[in-house]
Every structure is written in structure tokens, then in C-alpha cells.
Image: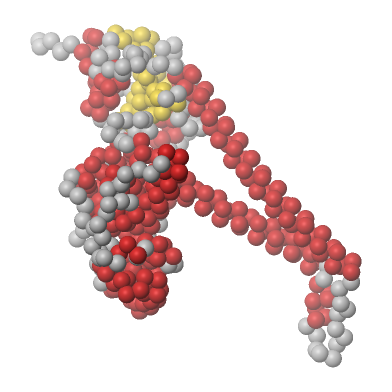
Amino acid sequence: MPAPDRNLIDRFLRERDEAAFTELVRRYGPVVWGACRRALANTQDAEDAFQATFLVLLRRAAKLDRDTPLGPWLYRVAALTARNVVRANRRRAAVNGPMEHEPLAPADPNAERLDLDAALLALSERERAAVVLCHLQGFTRREAAERLGCPEGTLSARLNRALSRLRACLGTGWSAALAGAAVALPAGFARATVRSATVYSTSALAAPGLSPAVAQLADGVLRMFWMKKMMGAAAVLVLLAGAGVLTFGTAGRTSNAARATEPLAAPAPPPASAEDQEAAKRIDRLIANLEKQRMLLGVTLENLKAEKMKLEEANAALELGKDIEVFVSDKESSHPLVVREVVNGRAAEVTCRDLDSLTAYLRRAHADPQGPKGLRIIAYKDHAAEELREVFTACAVSGFAKASFGQVGRPSFMMSTKSVVEMANKSYGVSETRLAPRAKLEQKPDEIDLRQYAAPKKQP
């Protein structure tokens, strides 16, 4: 039985299981590639949009409902990402002139007049999911209903409504457009996407192998999600404010409302006076002013949060300086080895699951063309000496001749593994985000000679 999508995502995020992510690309690559290729005539643009779509999946995976079918969600992200590329190309062409694009030959001579993706995005989310599952992914109506968690009859009704709207929008070519919506991936393209996803999820650093254009596209789509969430929250606040004022305005008229429910023989309430009408207008103006102030305060609050984060990152980068810090946690921890350094003016971190990945990372850092960096090593005070010796050896074979070594005490209260790592790493003031107050070193850091650990042990 095929592994569920959620299990594949968890395996990749937790264990960096590239085979799991390769399976995800195999399952949904044709749907995503079709959406990107229809919107973008230039192959490189389509490839960037394709890879960015799967990077957005990695960043949004924790917020996705486990019961949400992945195919319809990925299709929508791919269509939005491709639209962002089209808009960016138009803006660039307006400044620099048109660019040469390779033509995309449509399989159907009428395909140029069909905008399948615009028609699909115009459908409701439920109707679009039914079309994607049944016509783009090839599931039967029964299988699609199981994935959506609804009766087969409900799925059929949604699908019939969706197809009627597509027929009205696209004309006689709607069936052929749907039949060719999923496009086979080029050879080797899935492997490149998995490699980019591995780099993107392993490190917050600017590592080779990940195109800046792909990273910018992914960030742009994530900002769209964030803006949509903020606009929804603002709408809820406005509705709540309006409901509160409405309650306030009607509280004094409860007796009139009660009289209005009496038999018809009872006298009708008197009409509103000019004073009441003017008071109502003043309340309306007050509501409008409050709504504007609420929006302004929300924007100001977000700006202040962003500035605070920038200051914290700048302070962390200043304290870390040109050093690289390695924090050694327990082997069974989810963060056994955490490396922090300053990249592009910001303190960033990467988690190494084993000594081999730590050695590979430190070798690249030691060979940095911008100059050698100092090395700091931090561990718990009661850490096993043999495990520390293995870490020292990994640092030595990476090219570092010396390092400063300090120890911190374990927290005396229960907290998550990640929080423990973050607090201990604050020993040198290193921070990628806002963390808890830093733990204190048990003693002044000592400088150790790593060269002695690089030499092989003598046989007795």
C-alpha cells in the first residue's frame, strides 16, 4: 500500500529521506509541471516555478490539514507561482524591453484561446479539488470522494457543477484542455528538485545548489499566504467592532423592540426623530474612524515587530563576529549538533544529524574564500568525554587547529529539546530568532589544541 503523503513529508523533514520527497515529486510533478508550463513559455521560468512550488510545500507543511488532499493544494500553489513569474516578466519588460522567449507549441490548435488555469482558479475550492483529483490526477469518483472525506454523491454533484462552469467558460475545448493538463516531467528534473529541496530544508544559509530566483519565488508565494491571513484577521476584527457598536446602539431600544412584538392592536413605535438619525450618522462615522485606526495600529505593530527582529539579529551577529559556534547536545536529541555563524550579516544556524555532516559543513566553512573563522565549541557540563573527543576529532579533520571550549549546565526545569538547545547556545549571544535568556557558562572558555585529535591513536 502506498505511503500517505503526510508520512512522506514527515520523513523528509525529520530524516532528510530524499526517497520520500522523490515519491512526492513523482506523484504530483505532472500536475504542477503542467500548470507551470501552460503559463510560462520559457523553460527556465517554468522550472523555477516548479521547484518553488515544492519549496512552498516544505515551508507550509506544518500548517496543512493532514486530511487535505495534496494534489489540489499543490496545483493552486503552482498556478499562483507561475502568475507571479508572468507579472515579474511584464514589469521587467516594461523597463528593459521584451525578452526573447521560446514558443510553447500547443497540442490543440485552439489551446491558445483557452485559459484553463484561470477557469480552474475561478471555481470554488471544493469544485476545483474535485476536478483536479478526477481529471488531472486520474482518480475515480469513489477514490476522490474518499480523499475528500465526503459521500460519492456529494463529490459527483460538485464535479458536475464544476464541469458545467468550465464548459461555459472554455467552450468546446474544455475536455481536451483537461485531458492534457498533466504533463510528464523532463528527464532528471525530479532529481534536481529533490536536491534543491534538501538544500532549502537543511540550512537557512545561502548554500550552492539553490537558485536565488527559485528562493525568491517561494518567498513571494509565502508572503501572499501571509497577506491573505492578515486580511482575513482584519476583516474579523472589523466585523467584531461593528457587532460591538451595533449592540451598544440597540441596547437602549430594547423596550421598543419588545413592544414591536406585541399583537397588531398595540400602538406602533413612534418614527425616529431627526436627533436619532443624526446620532446614527455620528455612530457610523465613529465606526469608520475606529476601523481606520485599527488598521493603522495593526500595520504599525507589524513594522515594530520587524524592526525588533532586525535589531535582535544584528546584535546576535555582532556578538558572534567571525566565529563559528558548534553546540553539542545529546545524540538522541532532535538537534544533536547545531552550527551557527554569520552569513550576509545575519546569524543563522544549521542542524547536523551526525559527525559526517558536521565535518562536511566545517570543511566548507574552513575553506571560505572570505577568510578563516575562529571556532567555538559548547557542550553540557556532564557530557560524556568520549563523545566530546569524537566532536573534537571531526573539527580537527575539518582543518581547524584550535578552538575555544566552554560548558553549560543543564536546565533544572522541563522544556522542549529545541528550547534547551536554544538556551544553551545563548552562551555566546548567538540567535537566529527571538530566543529565551541565554544560559551562563560554568567556567571561562578554554582554548584547546585540536591537532592532537587529528592524529591517529597509537596502537599498544
* Image location of residue 68, percent across then percent down: 37, 60
**Farthest bottom residue in view:** 265
Q: Is residue 186 above or below residue 334?
A: below
> Quadrant of the image for the C terminus?
top left
Dividing the picture into quadrants, the one containing residue 123 is bottom left
> Is 321 on the left or on the right of 386, as rendered?
right
* Image location of residue 347, percent across then percent down: 44, 26
Q: Tell me, yes or no, if residue 60 can be seen here.
A: no
- Please tell me which residue lies in front, 209 or 324: 209
**Farthest front residue in view:** 97
- Please tell me which residue lies in front, 211 or 247: 211
- Please tell me which residue lies in front, 263 or 197: 197
Q: Tell me, yes or no, if residue 326 can be seen here.
A: yes
Q: How many marks do you count on the picture?
A: 0
- Please tell me which residue lies in front, 255 or 373: 373
* Image location of residue 24, percent across then percent down: 26, 52
Query: Which residue is rendered at x = 80% and y = 78% of the image?
Result: 258
Q: How is the image coloured?
A: secondary structure
> Quadrant of the image for the N terminus?
bottom left
* Image location of residue 59, percent across then percent down: 39, 45
Query: Which residue is rendered at x = 15% and y = 12% of the image?
Result: 457
Q: Is residue 228 above or below residue 178?
A: above
Query: Which residue is rendered at x = 89% and y = 69% of the image?
Result: 274
Query: Which residue is rendered at x = 65% and y = 60% of the image?
Result: 239
Q: Is residue 261 above or below residue 184?
A: below
Q: Is residue 63 above or below residue 136?
A: above
